Amino acid sequence: MVSVRNSVVIPVGEKQTHEAKFVSFHGLSDGKEHIALVFKEADSGQAVPLVRLHSECLTGDVFHSARCDCGQQLDEAIELMAQKGGILLYLRQEGRGIGLYNKLDAYSLQDTGLNTFEANNALGFENDLRDFSIAAQMLQALGVTEIDLLTNNPEKVATIEQHNVKVRRQQTTGVFYNRHNGHYLAAKAEVAKHHIDLRRQNKLAS
Ligand SMILES: Nc1nc2c(ncn2[C@@H]2O[C@H](COP(=O)(O)OP(=O)(O)OP(=O)(O)O)[C@@H](O)[C@H]2O)c(=O)[nH]1
Ligand SMILES: [Zn+2]
C-alpha cells in the first residue's frame, strides 16, 4: 500500500513566484524517489485535477537541451498548474527508463542517422522501458481517482486507466519544435503515435 511520506511547500517556477507542495511517498513498487508537486490544493480542492506525468530528462529539464522538448513541457506544466491548480508527477525515468549514460549513447547513435527508437534498439533496449503504473500508485495515495491528463502519449492514458484512475480528458502539450528536435518529434508521432501536430509548432497546450 502506497502512502504519503512527507509534504513540504517550495516556491518554484522561473521567478520562484509559484508555490507547490513537494510530496514524497512510502512503498512505491520500484523503490525510486518519484515526487508529486501539488499546486493550489489540487489534491483536495479540485474534483478532477489537471495532471502531468513528466519523465526525468536531465539534459532537457536542467540544461534546457534543444534535442528534445522536455524542458519546455515541464515549464509549461508548471505555469499552467500555477494558474489553475494541478499535480505534476516527476518520474525518475531518465531516458525513457534506460538511464542517462545509455541515453547519451543513444544520442551518439542518432548522430549517425538512427531515430530515437532505433538507437534504443541498437543498444539492446526496447523502444520504451517506462512503467506508468507508478503514477497511478502516487495518485491513489493522494486520494485522486479522476484526472485530466496533460500528455501527447497514448500509452500514459491507457496505463493510468488500466490502474483504476479515470482519465476524463487528454489535453495535448505545446509543440516545442526547434531546428535540433524535429526528427525526434516526428519519430514520436510516427512510431509511438504521440499526438504531436508539427503544424502547431510552438503553440502552447490547448
Ligand atoms: N532513450 C531515449 N530517451 C530519450 C531520448 N530523448 C528524450 N528521452 C527521454 O524521454 C523521456 C520523455 O519522453 P518522451 O517520449 O519525450 O515524451 P513522453 O513523456 O512519452 O510524452 P509526453 O507526455 O507527451 O511528453 C525523458 O525521460 C527523456 O529523458 C532519446 O533520444 N532516447
Ligand atoms: Zn528530454
Image (cartoon, rainbow, N blue to C red):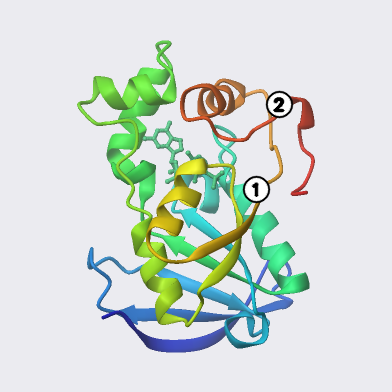
Q: Is residue 19 left or right of residue 97?
A: right
Crowdedness of circle 1 by 10 Å Cα count: few (<14), some, many (20+)? many
Residue 23 location (% of width, % of height): 45, 80
Foreground label between 2 and 1: 2
Given the image, on which type of amino acid does mark 1 rest? Gln
**Quarter of the N terminus within the rendering:** bottom left
User: Please, what secondary structure does the residue beneath circle 1 have?
Assistant: helix
Residue 96 location (% of width, % of height): 37, 42
The image quarter in which residue 24 lies: bottom left
Residue 140 location (% of width, % of height): 42, 76
> Can the viewer see residue 57 in this picture?
no
Q: Residue at x 22, y 68 (%)?
A: 31
Indicate whether 75 appears above or below 137: above
- Which residue position is annotated with label 2? 198
Q: Residue at x 45, y 43 (%)?
A: 155
User: Please, what secondary structure does the residue beneath circle 2 have?
Assistant: helix
Q: Residue at x 71, y 26 (%)?
A: 198
Indicate whether 137 appears above or below 61: below
Query: Disc 2 to disc 1, how far (Cα)?
Result: 16 Å
Q: Residue at x 23, y 63 (%)?
A: 30
Given the image, on which type of amino acid does mark 2 rest? Leu
- Which residue position is annotated with label 1? 72
Indicate whether 186 appears above or below 131: above
Residue 142 location (% of width, % of height): 46, 81
> Can the viewer see residue 7 in this picture?
yes
Crowdedness of circle 2 by 10 Å Cα count: few (<14), some, many (20+)? some
In this orientation, which residue lies closer to the viewer: 141 or 178? Answer: 141
The image quarter in which residue 17 lies: bottom right
Residue furthest to the top: 113
In this orientation, which residue lies closer to the viewer: 64 or 153? Answer: 153
Residue furthest to the left: 124
Q: Earlier in the sequence, mark 2 or mark 1?
A: 1
